[in-house]
Image (tube, rainbow, N blue to C red):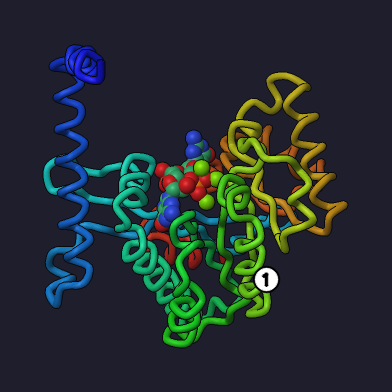
Amino acid sequence: HAKSKGRARYEVFDLETHTRVMAQLQLENDLRRAVQFLESPDTLKHNQFIVYYQPITCLKTGLIAGFEALLRWQHPQLGMVSPVQFIPIAEETGLIALLGQWVLEEACHQLRLWESYGYHRLTMAVNLSGCQLSRPDLLEKIDQIIHKSQIHADHLKLEITESMIINNADYVKQVLSQLKQRSIKLCMDDFGTGYSSLSYLHRFPLDILKIDKSFVSNMGEDGEHSDIVMTIINLAHHLNMEVIAEGVETLGQLKILSELGCEWGQGYFFSRPMDGKRALSLLENQL
Ligand code: C2E
Ligand code: MG
Ligand code: MG
Ligand code: MG
């Protein structure tokens, strides 16, 4: 019986599937190799990763309040591979541990550098993956990175998603509390796209809600999405959280968000993610 089942499955495993699986395996191998370079003494020469930074703008003053660090992989043959494609592979293979740590180090180091140029009040947001959050050495690593880069812990924001807190809620709550004890800020990313209940919002020590761009991009076209955004902003404020709107692309969206009392905006309207050098010149040009 098992045999006939196996054969049936084999038949579905056609050429197209084969090609796709091979491409996936190739990407996984390339990723493993690229991550290994991060640890080699020749890192600079071989490094295929770069952190981009996207400004987060204060809607009241129009000034850049900080940045979100967004990882980029420059694949030698494929060119830029999107994090949407390789972060899941990095998680499945455990490579995210090294990679995530590298992003944190790089982003904190960058923030320290900008501080040394006189930009003292900037914040840096870094995305955490579920795997990182469940690793027992997370706090130790973060402490090391903060110590080494000498940034203020309250200038560091860590972004997590709803799916990360529904599994293992008690453990996650404990880790988040320990991050809070260090004054690190915690953001709920992509808010509204998860399937969890809202009850976690007051059970976890979150500082900031990031409204997912799917709500923001549909705002203005119909009243419905503006109502949803308004409701999210009010909810956050009632729970003592501040709000970042993601995916702000138009002046119209910006105006609505300001009127609704949203604190910060992030999106192509302000700037695309860019490398550290260009992010610095953005800072220099606004003063
Ligand atoms: P995210 O954390 O929600 O980051 C925001 C994403 O929205 C970024 O995509 C950014 O480029 C994009 N974005 C910003 N403004 C706009 C806009 O106005 N319009 C549109 N259409 N998109 C906008 P990106 O850089 O491709 O990253 C995708 C996702 O990959 C991130 O979503 C995050 O979940 C993940 N990611 C990126 N870097 C890291 C990392 O270092 N670690 C981990 N664990 N995940 C990462
Ligand atoms: Mg994020
Ligand atoms: Mg997001
Ligand atoms: Mg996202």
Three-letter amino acid code at disc 1? Ser
Q: Residue at x 71, y 25 (%)?
A: 220
Looking at the rendered image, the quarter that the C terminus falls into is bottom right
Give x and y (percent) for residue 153: 59, 79
Q: Residue at x 60, y 69 (%)?
A: 175
The image shows residue 245, relative to residue 67, as above or below, that is above
- Number of residues whose C-alpha sits closer than 10 Å to that of mark 1, classed few (under 14), some (14–19) or many (20 or more): some
The one nearer the camera, 39 or 168, is 168
Residue 272 in sight here: no
The image shows residue 85, relative to residue 176, as above or below, that is above
Circle 1: element type: helix
Q: Circle 1 sits on which residue?
A: 177
Give x and y (percent) for residue 182: 63, 80
Give x and y (percent) for residue 180: 67, 73
Residue 53: which quarter of the image?
bottom left
The one nearer the camera, 36 or 14, is 14
Looking at the rendered image, the quarter that the N terminus falls into is top left
Q: Residue at x 75, y 36 (%)?
A: 229
The image shows residue 153, relative to residue 91, as above or below, that is below
The one nearer the camera, 32 or 77, is 32
Image-based side of 15 in relation to 191, left or right: left
Q: Residue at x 18, y 39 (%)?
A: 25
